[in-house]
Every structure is written in C-alpha cells, then in structure tokens.
Image (cartoon, rainbow, N blue to C red):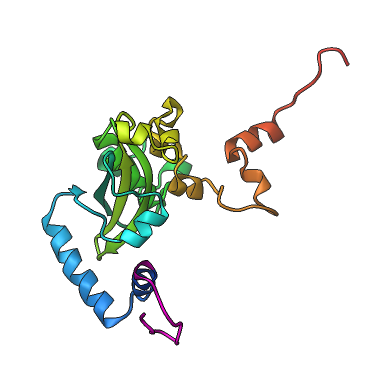
C-alpha cells in the first residue's frame, strides 16, 4: 500500500501511474519527459513499440496485451497550419489570400492517428493518447488493431472493429480525437447544431424544402 499526495491511502499500481502522470510539473516527471523527448528525437517519426509507455492510459482506452493489438508512437509537428500554396501565392480573391496565422480544423492527435492509419493500411485505429512534447513536436501513441487476426475476431469486446464500416475510422472523424474536433463530445445546450454534423445542420437550415402537393 502506498500513501502519497494528500493521504489518499492505499493505491494500486495503475492508479499510482495515473497520479504520477498527472503531475507533469514534478521533478521526476520533468526529468523523465526531457530524457524521453531526447530519445524520441533520434528515432523516426513513426515507430512500433513493444509495449505502451503509459500502460494505465492505454488500458483505459482499450489496449490489451494480446496478439493483434499493437502500439505505434507518432510524431507530429506543433503549431498552426500554413496554406499549402507555391511561393505563398493564392490565385484568388483577397479574402482567401491568407497563408500564415491559419489554424487546422483537425487537432494534432487526430493528425497523428491519420499518419499511423495511412502507413499501416491493414490495421484499424482504436484510440490514441499524448505521451510527450518538446518545442517542435508532439508525440502520441496510437493503439491499432489487426482486424484479420483470429485473437481479435474471437474477442467479443474487440471484434466490433473488424466490421468493414470501421475501415480508416481516423480519416472520417469517427475516433475519439475525431469526434472532439467535430464538436461531438458535448451534450445539451449549444451542441444541437453539431449533430449529425455542422454541415448537415447548415444544409437543413438553409435549404428550402416544399411538399409537391401543397
């Protein structure tokens, strides 16, 4: 039994790791993140891991240490999004001529999932979580599942992802990170205009629909 941080009493291993991860400004956490960031910078932008670096977080998001479930660490460049035009020239009206100071619609965690999903086309993205960051990059770990593996197809809690409707969930905004940038994580007042999507609501509210015989 471990008694730390305000006398919470006995704490299990995963709970201890969760509390440890929450205190990012602690001396040990800062030293560890600095060392890991240096290590991550020496490695490629997308690396397959033998095990998650945050087992407590990974397990909360659906990770199981079994065949067919893998973890990739993905590196994403921080900051806004420049408009991808040659020499900064936009051949259009002045309202669209901004190149810098633009913000991406999709968040960085979703971009990391997209990177992993495109590289590993045969796997399905289950979820992802933040692990580290420095001044240039953010690092996320993406949990991926092999939909053709027998161990996955026989797992009643996991085989929903084998359905073909879940191909490239990360590219269609269906993962948790995708639903967040679409504004689907909230309920109640103010969120009614986000469902089923902002575009669908706009189309419904602005289009004139008349009955044939009226």
Q: Position of residue 123 (x, y in %)?
A: 30, 34
Residue 11, magenta (yes or no):
yes
| Image position of 28 with respect to 73: above or below | below
The residue at 36%/76% (across/down) is 23
Quarter the C terminus occupies:
top right
Magenta residues, dominant SS class: loop
Q: Position of residue 37 (x, y in %)?
A: 19, 65
Give the image quarter of residue 171: top left
Residue 113, magenta (yes or no):
no
The residue at 41%/43% (across/down) is 97
Left or right: 176 as drawn, with respect to 168: right
Q: Name, please, the residue furthest toward the top.
A: 213
| Viewer-closest of 95 and 41 | 41
| Image position of 194 with respect to 52: above or below | above
Q: Position of residue 168 (x, y in %)?
A: 38, 33
| Residue 84 seen in this snapshot | no
| Viewer-closest of 210 and 115 | 115
Q: Name, please, the residue furthest toward the right.
A: 214
Left or right: 124 as drawn, with respect to 190: left
The residue at 25%/65% (across/down) is 135
Give the image quarter of residue 116: top left
Q: Which residues are magenta?
A: 1-14
Give the image quarter of residue 41: bottom left
Q: Name, please, the residue furthest toward the bottom.
A: 7
Quarter the N terminus occupies:
bottom left
């Amino acid at each position: 039994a471990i008694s730390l941080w305000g006398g919470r009493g006995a704490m299990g291993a995963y709970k201890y790791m969760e509390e440890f991860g929450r205190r990012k400004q602690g001396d040990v956490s800062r030293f560890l993140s600095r060392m890991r960031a240096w290590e991550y910078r020496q490695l490629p932008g997308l690396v397959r891991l033998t095990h998650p670096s945050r087992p407590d977080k990974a397990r909360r998001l659906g990770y199981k240490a079994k065949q067919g479930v893998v973890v990739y660490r993905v590196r994403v460049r921080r900051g806004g999004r420049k408009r991808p035009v040659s020499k900064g020239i936009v051949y259009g009206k002045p309202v669209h001529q901004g190149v810098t100071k633009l913000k991406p619609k999709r968040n960085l965690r979703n971009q990391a999932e997209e990177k992993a999903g495109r590289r590993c086309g045969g796997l399905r993205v289950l979820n992802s979580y933040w692990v580290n960051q420095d001044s240039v990059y953010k690092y996320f770990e993406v949990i991926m599942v092999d939909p053709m593996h027998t161990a996955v197809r026989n797992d009643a809690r996991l085989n929903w992802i084998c359905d073909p409707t879940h191909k490239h969930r990360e590219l269609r905004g269906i993962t948790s990170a995708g639903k967040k940038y679409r504004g689907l994580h909230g309920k109640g007042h103010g969120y009614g205009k986000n469902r089923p999507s902002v575009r669908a609501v706009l189309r419904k509210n602005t289009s004139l629909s008349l009955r044939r015989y009226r």
